[in-house]
Amino acid sequence: MINPAKPLQVYVVEDSDIVLRLLTSAIESAGGELMGAADNAQQAILELQNLRPNLVMIDLVLAEGSGFEVLDAIQTGGAGRDAIGVVFTNHVSTEDRERSFLLGASYFFDKSTQGRQALELINKMAAERRARTSTRADPGRPSGQG
C-alpha cells in the first residue's frame, strides 16, 4: 500500500503579525501545515519540546528573548528535534549570520532582500515532502511482493 507523506510541518517564531501572516499563507499555499507559532523565545522552546516540525522559521529579534535561544534549544535536542532551522530576519550582520550557523541554522535569509528565496525554500521543501511516498508491505502477500 502506498501512502502519501505527511505535509511539510512548520513552526514559526516571529513577532510581526504581518510577517507571520505572509509565512502562514506561503506555508498553506505550498501544501504545508502550520503546527504553531510564537512571538517569544520561551513560548517557542516550550511548544517545540512537544512538537516535531520539519522546518522552524526563526526571527532573531523577538518580543521577548531571541531567536538564538530557539536555535540553541533545537541544536541541543531539547526542542523541535531534527527540525531544519531557518533564520528569517532583518538583523543581518556578519556576527548574527555566523552565530546562527554555529547554533545549527541551515539557512539564513534577510527579510528585506531575500524574502522570495525564503518562500521558494518553503515551496521546495513542501514539494519534496509531497513527492515522498512510503510503501508498506501488504501482510497478505509474500515478502518481496509488496
Image (spheres, rainbow, N blue to C red):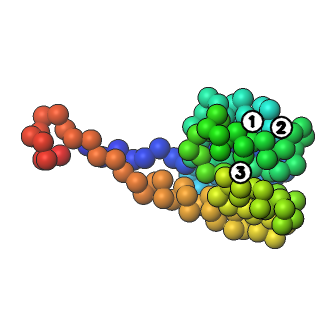
Looking at the picture, how far across and down is residue 124, in whole percent? 56, 62
Neighbours of disc 3 within 10 Å: few (<14), some (14-19), many (20+): some
Q: Mark 2 highlights which residue? A: 40
Can you say which quadrant of the picture contains the N terminus?
Answer: top left
**Camera-side mark, 2 or 3:** 3
82, above or below 101, in the image: above
> In what element is the residue under mark 1?
helix
Looking at the picture, how far across and down is residue 98, in whole percent? 77, 62
The amino acid beneath tag 2 is Asn
Earlier in the chain: of badge 1 and badge 3, it is: 1
Neighbours of disc 2 within 10 Å: few (<14), some (14-19), many (20+): many
Looking at the picture, how far across and down is residue 137, in whole percent? 21, 41
Mark 1 vs mark 3, CA separation in Å = 16 Å
Q: Mark 1 highlights which residue? A: 44
> In what element is the residue under mark 3?
loop
The amino acid beneath tag 3 is Leu
Return the mark for residue 103.
3
**Camera-side mark, 1 or 3:** 3
Residue reaching furthest to the bottom: 113
Task: Give yes or no for contact between labels 2 and 1 (Cβ–Cβ under 8 Å).
Answer: yes
